[in-house]
Amino acid sequence: MVGLLALVTYSNIIETAGITGDGHLHWEPECQQPVPNGMPITTVLPPHISGPWISTGCEVRPGPEFLTRSYTFYSNRLFRAYQFYYRDPSCQEPAHSLLIKGKVRLRRASWITQGATEADYHLHKVGIVFHSHHALLDIARRLNQTQTGQDCTGRLPLDRAWLPGTLYELLSSQVPGDCLAALGFSMNELSLLRLQHHMQQQPGAAPHLVKELFLGDVHTDWTERQHYRPTGYQRPLQSVLHHTWPCLACSLIACSDEHHPPVLPPGPSLPLHLGGHWVSMGCEARPAVLFLTRLFTFDDHRRSWEGHYHHFSDPACRQPTFTVSAAGHYSRGAPSPRVHGGTELTFEVTRAHVTPMDQVTTAILNFSKPSSCGGAGVWSDPASLASPSPHTVTLICRVLICSGGLSSR
């Protein structure tokens, strides 16, 4: 399988892993923990979300969209949210800002995504402020692409009538009509929440409390966002009062509003050198109730790569279910025409194998259809084998070539 990846290198990516004598990756002990040095993560159920929550850096959504977020939840269930959109992946060129007001009601613990809470929300108002003439034209162009959007263009100013700093309503409880779907906008992220606490260790100081609020993931297809019910999460927001240190962007985002979007400080421009070992900074949540950690190695000279996806059944990544390992080659990158500062690479998978890590996953694999990948009845999970024989290990680590590559869902 050949895939296309737009990749941006940032200075805060952590490289920490090792290679064994046979050239294969192995996990260092600290790489297996979602939080450094084994500091425990506490999930708060039901979540107490009152207060201000902010992004800790520039976020990326499908589109691509680059944004920062600042949400405030009040004790009477009302909320006010700012979403600041940018033209660049460093969040230094504001395009437009959204002011969102509404009400959210927590319901019950999610039956689908462990550790999450389901919620209902209702929007009272959504307004937009344009920070450049180019941003106005871009939004108008997106509205004109659909009939519903064309009916909404009257809510925006005429080209020559635009006034900087003016708030234009896209949705209001006082006016019929909704222009949000045509823009690919939805607040369905509020229908799934997860709140967790952990202590951040600081050299020469007492541990510092960090509160993280995970909201539901956003569908990659703009036309599906209005109907999509999230099962995974976005990059977490952090409490204004309890966030990681240092955080150069936090105070800028916390003090911003729809008229004064944050302009984040520039980061170092780093050349794209993939060579080395790259590891997840914590337990990752993906749609379809997938929790995983990832470990990659790249060889710039051979243009080869190897990746290990460790899947878990819990949001703390402590109960392993299966591991997928894949390897192959990648092409020399070319500058991305859509993401400024990004590089597009073509990755090819040449081999892959699966290792079940619990009895449930093993049973699923053993009931696979005849002639499908792996053979029915040959799988065993390592935990069930007190002293596996070499023949058994061969079955556990059987290399699978499925239609020429590995498909991730």
Image (spheres, rainbow, N blue to C red):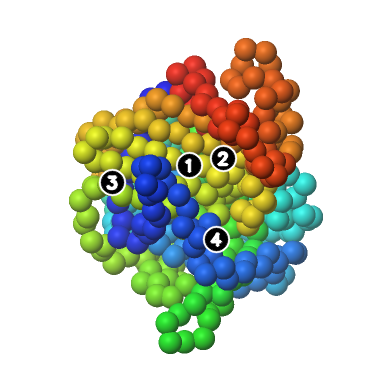
Residue position for label 4: 33
Quadrant containing the N terminus is: top left
Can residue 351 be seen by looking at this rendering?
yes
Q: What mark, if any, has residue 354 been given in the picture?
A: none
Q: Residue at x 40, y 72 (%)?
A: 247
Q: What mark, if any, has residue 308 been given in the picture?
A: 1
Q: Amino acid at mark 3?
A: Leu
In-image side of 273 versus 127 (left or right): left
Residue 298 is situated, as x and y percent measured from the top left of the image, at 32, 42
In-image side of 203 versus 112 (left or right): left
Confirm or deny contact between disc 1 and disc 2 (CB under 8 A). Answer: yes
Residue 56 is situated, as x and y percent measured from the top left of the image, at 44, 65
- How far apart are the alpha carbons under marks 3 and 1? 16 Å
Q: Residue furthest top?
A: 371
Residue position for label 3: 274
Give the structural element (helix, strand or loop) at label 4. loop
- How far apart are the alpha carbons under marks 1 and 2? 7 Å
Give the structural element (helix, strand or loop) at label 2. strand
Q: Amino acid at mark 4?
A: Gln
Indicate which disc, 2 or 4, sits on the residue closer to the N terminus: 4
Indicate which disc, 4 or 3, sits on the residue closer to the N terminus: 4
Confirm or deny contact between disc 4 and disc 1 (CB under 8 A). Answer: no
- How far apart are the alpha carbons under marks 2 and 3? 23 Å
Residue 372 is situated, as x and y percent measured from the top left of the image, at 61, 16
Indicate which disc, 3 or 1, sits on the residue closer to the N terminus: 3
- How far apart are the alpha carbons under marks 2 and 4? 16 Å
136, 72: nearer the viewer: 72
Indicate which disc, 2 or 3, sits on the residue closer to the N terminus: 3
Residue position for label 2: 323
Quadrant containing the C terminus is: top right
